Structures are given as C-alpha cells and as structure tokens.
Image: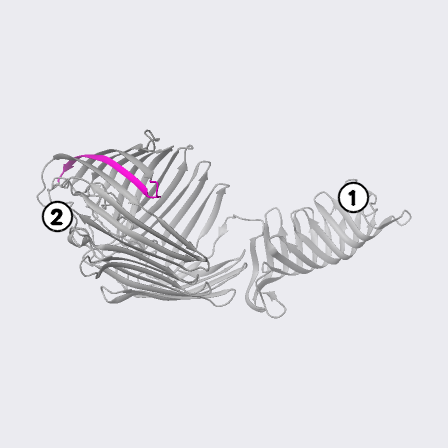
Amino acid sequence: MAGPTLAQQPDALLSAREVIQDRDAGTITAQGDVEVAYGTRTLRADRIIYHTDRDVILAEGNVAIIDDNGDAVFAERAEVTSDLDEAFVNQVRALLRGSNRMTAANAVRTGDNLTVFNKARFTPCSACTFGDEEQPLWHLEADEVTHDQEARTLRYRNARLNMFGIPVAYTPYFQHPDWTVTRQSGLLSPSFGSTSFQGAYINLPYYHVIDDTSDITLTPRIMQNRLPVLSLEHRQLLPYGEMRTEVSGTYSRRRDLNDRWREESFRGHIDASGRFSLTDRWRAGYDLRRSTDQSYLRAYDFVDASRYNSHAFAERFDGRSYFGANAFAYQILTDELSEKRQPIVLPLLEFSHAGEPQWGSAYPTLDASLLSIVRREGREVGRLSVTPGITLPAIGRFGEVYKFRAAVQMDGYWTQGHQPGSSDPDPANPDDQITTGRIFPHASLEVRYPWLIQSEGLQQTLEPTVQFVAAPSGGNHRRIPNEDSVDITFDDTNLFSISRYPGLDRVDSGSRVDYGLNYSLATGEGFYSELFLGQSYRFEKNNAFPADSGLRNRRSDFVTRLRLRPIDEIDLVYRARLDHSSLRPLQQEAEARLGPDHLNVELGYMDIPDLSNQSFFGRREEVSGQINAQLSRRWYASAYATRDLAEDYTPRVGLALGFECECFNFSAGVERRRYRDREIEPGYNFLFNITFRYLGGAGSD
C-alpha cells in the first residue's frame, strides 16, 4: 500500500505493506517491501523506523540505497536522513557502475558529495576471478577510502594492492579516478626499457585535459647514456574534423654516412596530421612528417620505417566527378637512396569524370592531371595530361558481358636538368630545358562469358575473359622522363588493365590480346577453391618494359592465383608469375593460415625481383611465420620469425605472452633483431607491460 509522505520531506514518498504512526514516540514504522523515494534516490528495506524529531530513518533487513545512475549500496542496517543525502551504513556492499564493487565495515555519507568507507576493499574485477570461490583477481584494501563525487576520485589511506589474495604493494596515500571519468589530467603509466644506444631509460608521461575537445601528453624520457628526450603530443577535436601533432627533441651525438660520430647537436621530429570535412562535397587534410636526420626516429624508437612522407590534399566529390589537389614531400630514412634527389610534388591536380549515359548505355569519360616536380638536386618536371574517352558496356543474348573503351591520352612535358634516355634523376650531363609531348590513342574490347553450374550442395563458376587492345607502337621516347612508372609489378590484378604501368609517364604501347580463365568451386559445407590463369600476347616485338618484368616478350609470362579453403580452419593463397616457356616461378607470394582461432599458424613467403631502374634493393626473398595460441580464456601466446633468404640471415625472431580481462592486462615478450643501422646495434629487445583498470600500470618498450 502507498503510505504518507515523510513529515519533514513533502517530496519523499513512502510505500509499504504496513505503516504505523506513533505520535507519542514521534515515529513512523513501515514494514514489508518498504520503499522510500526522494528525488533521484530510493531506499528499500524490510523495515524502517522514521524518527520525526531527528529527521532520521533507521532501516533494517535487506537494505538497499539506489541512485538513478545505477550505483547501489547494500547492508543489513543503515541510518539515513529523510532526503537520503546523508547516511551511516554498517557492513557495506556496494555494486557500482562498470561492474565495480566496494565492501567496507561501515560507510558515512555526508552532504551530497563525500562518502567515506572504513576498512574497505575496492575492485573493478567481476568476471576476472580466481579460485573455487571466484575471488576477484585483484583488489585494493585501505583503512579509509573517500569517494569524492564532485572531484570524481577515490582517495585511499594506507592502501594495499592484493593480487590472487596476496599483498604485493603498499602506499600510505593513493588516488585514482572513479568509474565516471573517461578523461582526467594526471600521470600516466610509466614505461621502461634498454637499448645499446640509449642505455636504460624510463618514460614518464603526463596527460593534461585542456577542455572537452583537446588534450596534451608531455613525455620526458630519462636515459642512462644520453641526454633526456622530451616529446609532446597535442590532440584537438573540431566540429568539422580533427588534428594531432607530436613533436620531440633532444641533444645527442649521431653517426653519419661514413660511420663517424658527430658532436652533439639538436635532434628531433614532427609528426602532425589533420582531417577535415569542409562540406558535404569537400574534404581536406594534411600529414606533416619530418626528422632532423635519417636515424633519429629509429634510434629513439619513434618510427621504424624507410620513408617519412608528408602530404597535403583537398578533394571534391560531386556525383560522377572527382577533383583532387595534392602536394607530396619525401624524406628517406635509410642510406640506400639520396635524400636530396627525392621529388617534391607541388602540385598534383587530378580530375576524373564519368558522364551520364548518352547513347544507349555508352557514357563519356575524362581524366586530366597537372603535375609539377622539383628537387633539391636534380631534374625538374612539369606535366599536363588530358585523356578524353568513351565506355560502352553491354550484355549479349547468351549472357556474355562486353565492355568497349576508347580514349586518347595527350601529354605535354616541360623538363629542366633531364638527360634523355637516362633514369637517373640527377644525371651528370643533363640537357637544358626540354619541351615535348605525345598523343596516344588506344581502344579495347573486353569480353567475359561467366558460366554457373549448380548441383545439390555444389556450385561451380567458370569465367573465360578475353581483351583486345589496339594502340600504336612507341610513345615512350627518350625525351619523356619517368617519374611515376618505375616500380612495375605484373600479376593477376593488372592483367586486364589498359596500361600495366602504375603511372602516366610510360604508356603500354602496341596492340595485344589478353586472355585468362577463372574457375571456382564451392560447397555448402565451407569448402571453397579458386584458380586463375592468364597471359598476354603482343603483336609487336618491341616495347619499353624491363627485361625481368614478364612483359618484355611477345608472349608475356603467365600470371596465376590459387586459393584453397577446404575448411574454415585452413586458408591458402598463392600468387605467381611463371616463365612463359619453362613455367618456372619468377615472382611468388604465398600466404597460409592453418588452425582454429585458439591455435593457428600464419605463414608467408615472398620472392620478388628488383625492377627499379638502377636495382637499388636487389631481389627480395623472405619467409615469415607466426604461431598464435589461446592458452585459456584469458591467456594467449605467440611466436614469430622472419627469414631473409636472399641475404641468408634472420632479421627478427620473438616470443610474446599475454593475459587479458576487463580489469587487468599483462603482456611480455622478447625479440631478437639482427640488423645494424648507424646508432642501432643488433641485440635483444625485452617487452613488458602491465595495466590495472583505473590504476594505470607500468611497462617496457
């Protein structure tokens, strides 16, 4: 039954099976499914006695005080004020948001802000437990825990960290954010490690919230063998995008190209990026990446890469049209290539349009670009390219699929410091200014005839494809430089491309026919297999492709792709380019994944020739493998290695072990790196990280 409101709190509502008011004693007693509601809080109990003179409620039996945010305090006995703002509770058990739990001998709530738990235990572990009694994996014990709801913190006095029921750490004072906090200023988890160049080091990051949309992280690194490094990361969320900027700096010695140590000087880097959605059709962005020298980023474990590329762009998408404005700059982080000869692309303007069907299903196309390249040392190139065309798709009466394409590529070039016929971007005896160009018409007809064969539990597809390409010979004369068509890869992905070059500086001249066959077999029980085999035949004898590209002869090499997935736990993919006469593999890539999710092996193999103009890198052949094991619901492990077959050494091998649950993460590993790069010596890297929810953690890089 609904009862009366409490005497001094007209907004409080009392309901119970039985309510007795004793005016002489100044009490209201309620029994049976008692509930007192005031504002956003609710008190439930088997029995309450409300003392009107003291405005205090004494609750007994299955007491629960519940906030509308989901926090609930349980006890057998409690004293609270009628507005439920202040309370004294014995034998507290609190179930808090985010599966957090608190127990205490007693708790005192004062005002609407502070709750003090005495002889308390706190843990965020609910599903992460150990033992037959499913005790939490870890908990904090303290003589006193104060929950400040305004500051959104938990403060501990004489705190002890227990793992698996065993005390492992003690501190007289400790504080961490409560479960309502997603961002808060303060120290983050430190990390530590050791390298031959830095010696032993420790990172001490400090995180600062600027406002609701921005923050910074300041990280000093203290090292045994070097002066400290200071890095700063700033993040900003905008109504129309986001920005991130990281900078670092130190004073340090470094090795030069001749392996000599230079005197201490400033070393640092910047890594900034931004992405902006300006309108429904326009977007823009930038990536600004630069280092003071080639080895700084690897020596101080910021980036392990061979290039550091900067890029700025603006794009417009409008129906069937696209416009892009780009600028590129490249920094080389290895010794193989000269940094001064790297191109600075400013600008690259691109436009592409596919018109609406005009004559039946035929539609016009237009591709255009404007390119300007400068260098600190070497040739300068300007290029204007315009390619109008038409595309006509059609389907025949027997299901065959046709696509006719015709276009005229018109290119104009302006060069300074280019030596005709040379692939060197900085030749010794370049010509002065050269103005040249070409007009290159081409047309193609692609015919596909897919077949589908179905029977009970079995589906087969067979798709032969033939493409005829008509184009004049030549077009790649010596006066045209090659900037964007150097790296050539001929495989199953570009067999039917009009041009097998990756860019516009070289054209795939001459008439030819491309043909291939794709076959797949699938069952309803997870079995799937696919085989593709294709080749190209050129009618003219001469072309500009490199000798090892697979496209130099009239009959190209065969390109093939094989995929086999007999069951979900086995997936094999193999790609290759086969010699057109002997069928010997000349270029290969293979991937394999064997086993279920809880125990599987990943294997990879790569054998790729060096098709760059001056054979900078040599033939690349390597094999890699990784074993992944889910040891239990929480534990996982992996082992991995990479073997360079061309150089006959193992550059990387390692082991890793980890544990994951909702309140605790642990990972550890060891890696052996067997390469030297200026300041970086071969050796072992030990990796370690441990993180407690809300508390942070510690680790090694």
Q: Circle 1 sits in a helix, a strand or a loop, which is it?
A: strand
User: Residue shown at 74%/50% (left/top)?
Assistant: 43
Q: Please, is residue 499 above or below residue 261 in the view? A: above
Q: Which residue is mark 2?
A: 541
User: Residue shown at 73%/56% (left/top)?
Assistant: 89
Mark 2 residue type: Lys
Q: Please, is residue 503 above or below residue 162 in the view? A: above
Q: Position of residue 461 (x, y in %)?
A: 37, 53
Q: Nearer the viewer, mark 2 or mark 1?
A: 2
Query: Can residue 88 be seen from the camera position used here?
Result: yes
Name the quadrant containing residue 406.
top left
Q: Position of residue 187 (x, y in %)?
A: 48, 53
Disc 2 crowd, CA 10 A, few/some/many (<14, 14-19, 20+): few
Q: Position of residue 642 (x, y in %)?
A: 31, 64
Q: Is 199 part of what is drawn in magenta?
A: no
Q: Circle 2 sits in a helix, a strand or a loop, which is it?
A: loop
User: Residue shown at 12%/45% (left/top)?
Assistant: 422
* Residue 41 - label: none
Name the quadrant containing residue 336.
bottom left
The magenta span reads: 396-417
Quadrant occupied by the C terminus: bottom left
Mark 1 residue type: Leu
Is 192 situated left or right of 664 in this image? left
The colouring scheme, among rainbow, by chain, secondary structure or one colour, is: one colour
Q: Which residue is mark 1?
A: 13
Total labels drawn: 2
Q: Is 403 part of what is drawn in magenta?
A: yes
Q: Of the residues under marks 2 and 1, which one precedes in the sequence?
A: 1
Disc 1 crowd, CA 10 A, few/some/many (<14, 14-19, 20+): some
Report the residue that reaches farthest toward the right.
24
